[in-house]
Every structure is written in structure tokens, then in C-alpha cells.
């Protein structure tokens, strides 16, 4: 019986401690705005021209799927387990 009471008391203390910590962290207030950075003195020299960014070639296209992968993709498309739209729109619905 005493063990049960002690466990319940410990749980209550843990809950009250968590509430106290959450109240002291001020989650409901916006963070303070940092002060503006000091302005640097103006320099009378001509600014340097920006360097041209290196041109990165596009990545090569992915290799074609293996026959096994192609079979899996075809099976998935045949059973409707894919999000790829058909290339031609379906005709008018038939009733």
C-alpha cells in the first residue's frame, strides 16, 4: 500500500515539475527581436565586380531500368498501383 502511495506521489511530483518547467520556458511568447547590426562606414572605393559563378553541367540522365525493374513497373501500372498518368486520355465513359 505504501509503495502504491509513493508511486502516485512521485507521478504527481513529476507532473508538477513538468508544468513548472513549461511555465518558466515561456513557449507562448515570441522570441525577443535582436538589435539591428551596427552600420559599417561607407567606403569610397569602387566595388569589385562579382565573380562569375561556375557553370555546373546537368546530371546525366538515369540509366534505363533493368528488365526486372521494367517488369515490376509494368505490373504496377497494369494493376493501378502507380501515380503515373496514362499518356492518352481515356475515351468517353460507356454505360
Image: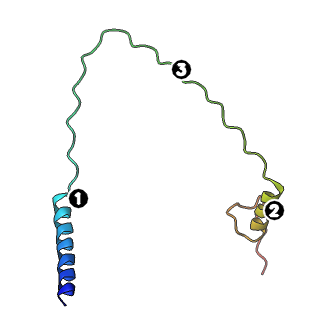
Give the colouring mode of the picture: rainbow
Q: Is residue 85 left or right of residue 37?
A: right
Of the 4 image quadrants, the one containing the N terminus is bottom left
Q: Which tag, 3 or 1, sits closer to the chain's start? A: 1
Q: Nearer the viewer, residue 69 or 48?
A: 69
Q: Which residue is mark 1?
A: 27
- In this orientation, which residue lies closer to the viewer: 78 or 13? 13
Q: Which mark is residue 44?
A: none
Q: Which residue is mark 3?
A: 52
Q: CA distance from mark 3 to mark 1?
A: 45 Å
Corner quadrant of residue 56: top right
- Measuring 23% from the left and 24% from the top, which residue is drawn there? 39
Q: Is residue 42 left or right of residue 94?
A: left
Left or right: residue 11 versus residue 77 is: left
Q: Is residue 55 above or below residue 27?
A: above
Residue wearing tag 2: 71
Percent of width and height locating residue 41: 24, 17
Instruction: Answer above or below: position of 30 versus 51.
Output: below
**In the rendered image of this protein, does residue 94 appear above or below residue 43?**
below
Mark 2 vs 1, N-terminal side: 1
Q: Position of residue 46 (x, y in %)?
A: 38, 10
Q: Residue at point 20% right, 63% down? A: 22
Amino acid at each position: 500500500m505504501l509503495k502504491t502511495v509513493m508511486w502516485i506521489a512521485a507521478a504527481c511530483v513529476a507532473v508538477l515539475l513538468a508544468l513548472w518547467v513549461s511555465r518558466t520556458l515561456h513557449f507562448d511568447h515570441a522570441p525577443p527581436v535582436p538589435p539591428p547590426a551596427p552600420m559599417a562606414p561607407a567606403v569610397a572605393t569602387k566595388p569589385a565586380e562579382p565573380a562569375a559563378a561556375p557553370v555546373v553541367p546537368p546530371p546525366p540522365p538515369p540509366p534505363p531500368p533493368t528488365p526486372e525493374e521494367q517488369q515490376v513497373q509494368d505490373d504496377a501500372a497494369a494493376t493501378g498501383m502507380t501515380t503515373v498518368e496514362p499518356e492518352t486520355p481515356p475515351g468517353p465513359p460507356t454505360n
